[in-house]
Image: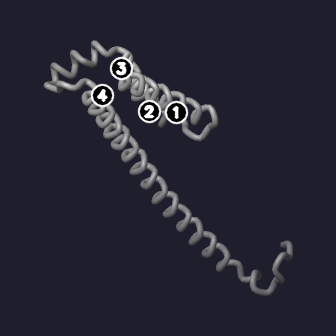
Amino acid sequence: MATIQIAAITVSALLLLGVLELVRRKKLTEEYSFVWIVCAIALLVLSIARQFLERVALAAGIYYPPAALLLVLILFVFIASVSFSVVISRQRQQIERLIEDAALADERIRQLQSTRPDDKTRPPGART
């Protein structure tokens, strides 16, 4: 087994174990970990199955198979980035909607407080 293959297997296995540990500690939700787990498993399989990687690399016109592995890694990072950009966009829209709802609720509270004339004469903390 070549040194580069051992390094690729080690890095892929560490990535997989790292993601699983983050999920176990509740630092990463299952929804977001799915992309990383799939990437780590695919990299691990490609690192172990060197013949398959060599065939794929030659079919793609890449004559150094570890470079194909790096290309696959870059593709996975791109896919993960797009996936997380979609999530961030969705969350931003939700935050904007919550801010609007909070502003409307605050305005409604002000309107209700201004319609009660006895609020100004009562001391703070007094019960009705």
Comparing marks 4 and 1, which lies closer to the viewer?
Answer: 4
User: Which residue is nearer to you in this view: 105 or 56?
Assistant: 56
Asked if residue 63 lies left or right of residue 27, the reply is left
Residue receiving disc 1: 19
Give residue 58's position: percent from left, percent from top: 17, 20
Comparing marks 3 and 4, which lies closer to the viewer?
Answer: 3
Q: CA distance from mark 1 to mark 2?
A: 7 Å
**Disc on the earlier residue, 4 or 1:** 1
Question: Quick check: marks 1 and 2 in contact, CB under 8 Å?
Answer: yes
The residue positioned 39% from the left and 51% from the top of the image is 89
Q: CA distance from mark 3 to mark 1?
A: 26 Å
Q: Which mark is residue 69?
A: 4
Which amino acid lies under the numbered mark 2 shown in the image of this protein?
A: Trp
Q: Residue furthest left?
A: 61
Q: For the residue carrying disc 1, how many other residues have a C-alpha within 10 Å: few (<14), some (14-19), or many (20+)? A: many
Q: For the residue carrying disc 2, how many other residues have a C-alpha within 10 Å: few (<14), some (14-19), or many (20+)? A: some
Which amino acid lies under the numbered mark 1 shown in the image of this protein?
A: Val
Q: Which mark is residue 36?
A: 2
